[in-house]
Amino acid sequence: MFTKPIHTKLLYLAILAAALLLPWYVPDAYIFQIVTMSVLYAIAASGMNLILGFTGQVTLAHGAFFGMGAYGVAIMTKAGIVFWLALPVSALIAAFIGLLIGLPTLRTRGAYFAIVTLCFGVIVWIVSGNWIELTGGHNGIFGIPRPSPIPVPFFGQIEFFTQTGMYYLALAVLLLVLFALYRLVYSVFGLTFMAVRNNEPLADSVGINTYATKLVSFVAGCFIAGLAGGMYAAMMGAVSPSAAGYMLTFNFLIFVILGGMATLPGPVVGAFAIPVLMEFMQFLDDYRMLIFGALLIMVIIYFPMGLVGGLRRLNQKVAAWRQQKFPESDHASR
Amino acid sequence: MLKLTQVHTDISGMQIIHNVSLEIKQGEFVALLGSNGAGKTTLFRTIAGVLKPNTGSIEFNGAPIHRLPVHKVVGLGLVLCPQGRQLFPHLTVEKNLRLGAYPLRGNKIRIHKNLDRVYELFPILKERSQQQAGTFSGGEQQMLAIARALMSEPQMLLLDEPSVGLAPLIVQQMADVISNINHEMDTTIFLSEQNANMALNITDRGYVLESGACVLSGDCDQLKNDEMVRKAYIGA
């Protein structure tokens, strides 16, 4: 069996430690906000990765489900419902609408699903800009309250009035989502997701209910998007149609593809690396998109598994080279 | 065990299978002969539930199955091993096999037992259990496809043209393994083949399909000596 070298675990631990200590070494509020947004985007992109990467269904409405979570929390908390109830309810609403969309469309194969979800994403965006009574139209909804403090016995309470509190909340949810996805993807049921992606007619033949599998994956992915959207609303204090827009979908798509499809760290890496890259290329204005287009094509051709897949391949090559060069020291290095 | 009564199947308006009736008993090893485009694959896909017959009925162990979705049919122990060495190319050999055992999910002891059994049958798969299935040669892929079909302990196996595109030596190996599965494991096998010579040497009896209709049936010796079969499929 191939076991992960110990240094991979060390790397993950180091990243976790760096993430936990972030508020101490990133004093700049602007950059801190970008990082917190990246955490939220990483959550949403991980949900998209479940549908797109692991199950192979090209969903182009992920921004819309993010938006449903955001508007859900915005409307409910403004109506006086506490955030801790509004968040799961909004995510469930996103999941339920995902179910309604998935029920007819996931029966089809190939491009049809992509086209339907793309249209649905645009429709949600248009509706969010025009249903003024519910969404406030293009101005959106302002003054969304922060999550109420959680009382902790013997400790006082955890507050979310600062950016730091929201950051830790987002980080906790990201870790929870990644853990849930880890358990799911490496279970027998998770294997069926990959079977559907690899060869759907064959998945049918071995006795997998491919329709139900795709539906579960899609609904779970939409739930995760709604969760991320809900936290976005509470963190920003305002939502507007851009939080439900198709541009958001394509951002998620870029995070997933460049980061690494069908790898758990991929979307997280993408959600952090790409906004940083964007900041560095600020001076290029909209020409940045040209570079991203070229980058996307290059990655799809040469690194179909994205940044993370490319790094893994490099790591395997190095490991093979080391084994060839120092066959007996292999045990010591693990 | 399997009984088809006057089955008709359309694919997008074109009638492919005309009025096919046949019966296969427990433990039998039966061949389905026919040239390219005769409808062998369509017939198999209809039996397995991938396609639905327009009229007629299909019974398995006495219960009608022609309205059931594929995964229910597989659950009953009737497994199709599709044409063209279908695999999950990006997954390892072991994962491919574990997916074959999907109807037994949760039953770790039986899955483990079946894994040992197919590794015994195909030692090469054990050696390469962690290799990606897509990197295999044609013969190895076909072995993996058959091994995967065996993982769910099927009562009856539908093997759709396992010899296609394989070297003659490999075809012989494959034929040995398939008869072994029938004799030793007591699995009923329905084997579709263009290679009539090979098929008639290992099976008990056969059906001949032509333009979607069953034109001939009988014991292998009988079929081997039949004028039409000799001309059309054996070439002597």
Image (cartoon, coloured by chain):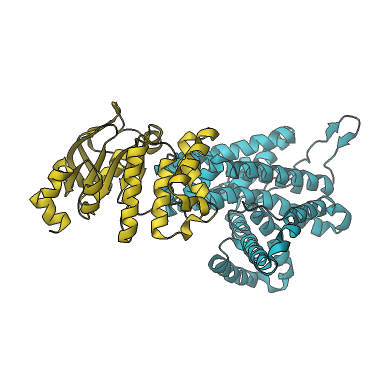
Chain colours: A cyan, B yellow
Up the image or down, A70 lies above or below B234; here it is above
- In the image, A172: left or right of A125? right
Q: Nearer the viewer, residue B7 or B122?
A: B122
Q: Can residue A317 be seen in this view?
A: yes
Q: Can residue A102 be seen in this view?
A: no
- In the image, A108: left or right of A122? left
Up the image or down, A244 lies above or below B116; here it is below
Q: Quadrant of the C terminus of chain A?
A: bottom right
- In the image, A85: left or right of B54? right
- In the image, B120: left or right of A320? left
Residue positioned most to the top: B62
- Residue A272, given in percent of the width and then of the height, sits at 71, 58
Q: Which residue is drawn at 61% across and 50% down?
A: A244
Up the image or down, A83 lies above or below A48; here it is above
Q: Which residue is drawn at 31% across and 54% down?
A: B172
Q: In which quarter of the image is residue B7?
A: top left
Q: Nearer the viewer, residue A303 or B158?
A: B158
- Residue A95, given in percent of the width and then of the height, sits at 58, 39
- Residue A245, given in percent of the width and then of the height, sits at 60, 53
Q: Which of A103 and B66 is in front in this view?
A: B66
Q: Nearer the viewer, residue A30 or B121?
A: B121
Q: Count the labels in the image.
A: 0
- Residue A89, given in percent of the width and then of the height, sits at 65, 34
Residue positioned most to the left: B227
